[in-house]
Amino acid sequence: MKSGRNVIIILLVIFSVTGFSCSRKKVVKQNQKKPNVIILFSDQHNKKVMGFEGHPDVITPNLDKLAAESLIFDKAYCNVGVCTPSRSALLTGLMPRTLGLLANPGHTSVMDDAVSMATIFKNNNYNTYAFGKRHVSTSIDAGWDVKKDHAYKPNDDDNYVSWIERNGYAKEFAHDWAAEFGRGPRGSSEFETKIPTADLGTRISKLPEDFTMEAFTTQETIKMIKEQAKSEKPFLCWATFYRPHQPYNPLQKYMDMYNVSEWGEGTKKGSGIKIPESFYEPTKNLPPLLQSQRNGGNKVWNMDKAFKNEQLWRNYIGAYYALVTEIDHCVGEILNALEEADLEEETIVIYTSDHGDFVGNHGMVEKAAAGQNVYEDILNIPLIIRFPGKTKNGKRTAELVTLADVLPTLIEMLDLKVPDLKYPIQGESMADIITKNGSMNRDYLISESWSQAAVITQNSKLGIMLDPTVVHKNWDYREFGDMFFDMEKDPLEIDNKINDKNYEQEIAKLRGYYKEFVKNTPPTGKDEMIKNRLNKE
């Protein structure tokens, strides 16, 4: 990193962006500040649901522009297909089995002792900010000078729920929130109010545009940018969006951009939204929990009802696209603020998400994380990095990378000092890929939950059913068997070749990779979690 450059890093974690033009010539401020960092992070963004990925329907002009000015990672994966462990891997560079986080709930001493991204940046003289959904805890969430959450926090009036209450929109937000939960959010005056859920968790929002959860994150981030433009210290900001995670509550103005009245060839080719290619996959192909949900086992999703009335499916898919478009707009607003503050030419932008959503693929809604951890729709995430003067515009890389690689990448690129760590960072730096066209030289990646571990290579994937019974007795799906996909021949992952003798050697090789990963990755937190559970019993 050349001294004298003021660079802002924006980890744009999922959604729309108004990028800068690398062809513009501006005077770069000459000072000794380290680069700033903004992490813009969405929740549950399916990688394929962006315009520049060739999607026939979704409208994402800002993300498309950002991608045209960035390095695009085609093979980026989350470390677990669920929020908390995935976000924790991002913020610590540690694998979920080491943290003891293989599902959303949980607490271990490793989590208490891990050193967070915010703490490292703070120790390097950064101001640190977090706005929006964090969904992490203990030392993983430490180091923020200012943090304003989406969720209600006791004795904290700066969260989104309290903000909505003060502005008189508690009933409207409760209407939205209840689409999945059947009541208002915790901490709200509407928490005890019973409100009907919605089929597939989908209903149009009643909130004004400036009062959605995404607007809250956007406004706080823009306010921070204006204040920090005058600061002598650099900043780290994790600006995270709740969407397009369920409940699926788009604003009407964004929903109106999509014709959900019929299946069609996509908005770019004709009327109606395009039907997901694996939508009618036979139920028997799917792992047991997904089969149950397809058959009506979840009374919020009501997928059995939706297969009898496919308008419900189109409503959900269109709502998901609309939420992505809203986030695209919000990210564009944030990047515009950077430009107005004369910071965009000195900004590194990284856009990513914690995991994906089925969006109708495999005939499924949301992520069903407790029942599987294998499909590309959930594990393959957006990762876009713009580094002025370093990344080539619109270039793609097929390097295998994970969210755990983000922290070591920032440490190397920004030359950050790191304290002695009780648990050394396990992710690997992507700096050579970003700045030198180098390689990670990885043969495989592992994404691992309590119920299933996915071994991912360039062209194949093995889903190994695990024994989760010590911690989650209801997640034992081993009788269903393992899953193997030839992703080159079967990109939709609908033809399980686990019993095909033609793939025996490849399957054995991937099993060997998993054994190698288990051997080399300390299960410190996982073992503690199991021990704690056994002691309770």
Image: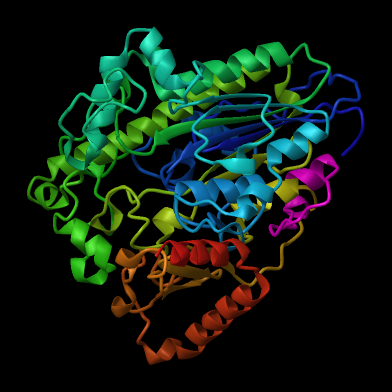
Quarter of the image with the C terminus is bottom left
Q: Quadrant of residue 223?
A: top right
Instruction: In this rendered view, identify the residue nearer to me: 430 or 73.
Output: 430
Relative vertical location of residue 112 with respect to residue 474 in this rendering, above or below: above
Residue drawn where x is 45% and y is 50% of the image: 104
Q: Residue at x 77, y 32 (%)?
A: 122
**In the image: residue 221, left or right of residue 172:** right
Q: Give the x, y percent position of residue 251.
A: 31, 22
Farthest residue toward the top?
A: 167
Q: Is residue 476 above or below residue 96?
A: below
Which segment did they paint magenta?
410-433
The vertical placement of 362 against 208, above or below, is below
Q: Position of residue 143 (x, y in %)?
A: 69, 33
Residue 282 appears in the rendering: no
Position in image of residue 492 (x %, y %):
36, 63
Q: Is residue 480 left or right of residue 68?
A: left
